[in-house]
Image (cartoon, rainbow, N blue to C red):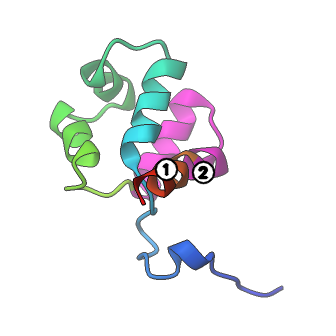
C-alpha cells in the first residue's frame, strides 16, 4: 500500500483540513434544521466563540471537531472535506 497525499492538501498540517469552513458549517446548519451558529455550537457541545473562530479562520477544523460533526450530522468525513474543498475552489 502506498501513501499518497492529495495535491491540494500536501502543505496542510495533519491536524487541519484545507478549504472553506463556512460551506461546511452552513451545510450542517441546513441539514440539521438549526436556526444559527449558536444552535450548532450547542449541538456540537462547544462554546459559541468556537464556531465564530472556525468561520473566521482563527481556528482550524481539526480531526476532533470533524469527528464530532460527523457524529451529530451523520455526514461522512469525506463528504465534509469535499464541501470545504468545494468552497475553497470557488474562492480562487
The C terminus, quarter of image: bottom left
Would you place residue 50 above or below residue 18 in this image? above
How many angstroms separate mark 2 from mark 1 (CA)? Answer: 5 Å
Q: Measuring 49% from the left and 30% from the top, which residue is drawn there?
A: 27
Q: Measuring 48% from the left and 38% from the top, which residue is drawn there?
A: 69
Residue 77 lies, in percent from the top left, at: 61, 49
In terms of secondary structure, where does tag 2 sit? Answer: helix
**Residue 78 is covered by the magenta coloring:** yes
The part of the image, by quadrant, that contains residue 51 is: top left
Specify the segment rendered in magenta: 62-82
The residue indicated by pointer 2 is 82
The part of the image, by quadrant, that contains residue 91 is: bottom left
The N terminus, quarter of image: bottom right
Labelled pair 2, 1 in contact (Cβ < 8 Å):
yes
Question: Which numbered disc covers residue 72?
Answer: none
Q: Residue furthest left?
A: 49
Magenta stretch prevailing secondary structure: helix
The part of the image, by quadrant, that contains residue 43 is: top left
Front residue of this view, candidates 45 and 40: 40
Would you place residue 42 above or below residue 85 in this image? above
The residue indicated by pointer 1 is 84
Front residue of this view, candidates 46 and 86: 86
In terms of secondary structure, where does tag 1 sit? Answer: helix
Mark 1: few/some/many CA within 10 Å (<14, 14-19, 20+) = many
- Left of 46 or right of it: where is 27? right
Q: Residue furthest bottom?
A: 2
Mark 2: few/some/many CA within 10 Å (<14, 14-19, 20+) = some
Residue 89 lies, in percent from the top left, at: 50, 56
Amino acid at each position: 500500500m502506498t501513501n499518497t497525499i492529495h495535491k491540494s492538501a500536501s502543505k496542510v498540517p495533519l491536524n487541519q483540513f484545507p478549504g472553506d469552513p463556512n460551506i461546511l458549517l452552513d451545510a450542517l446548519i441546513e441539514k440539521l434544521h438549526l436556526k444559527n451558529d449558536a444552535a450548532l455550537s450547542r449541538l456540537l457541545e462547544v462554546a459559541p466563540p468556537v464556531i465564530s473562530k472556525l468561520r473566521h479562520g482563527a481556528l482550524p477544523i481539526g480531526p476532533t471537531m470533524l469527528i464530532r460533526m460527523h457524529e451529530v450530522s451523520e455526514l461522512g468525513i469525506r463528504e465534509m472535506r469535499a464541501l470545504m474543498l468545494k468552497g475553497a475552489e470557488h474562492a480562487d
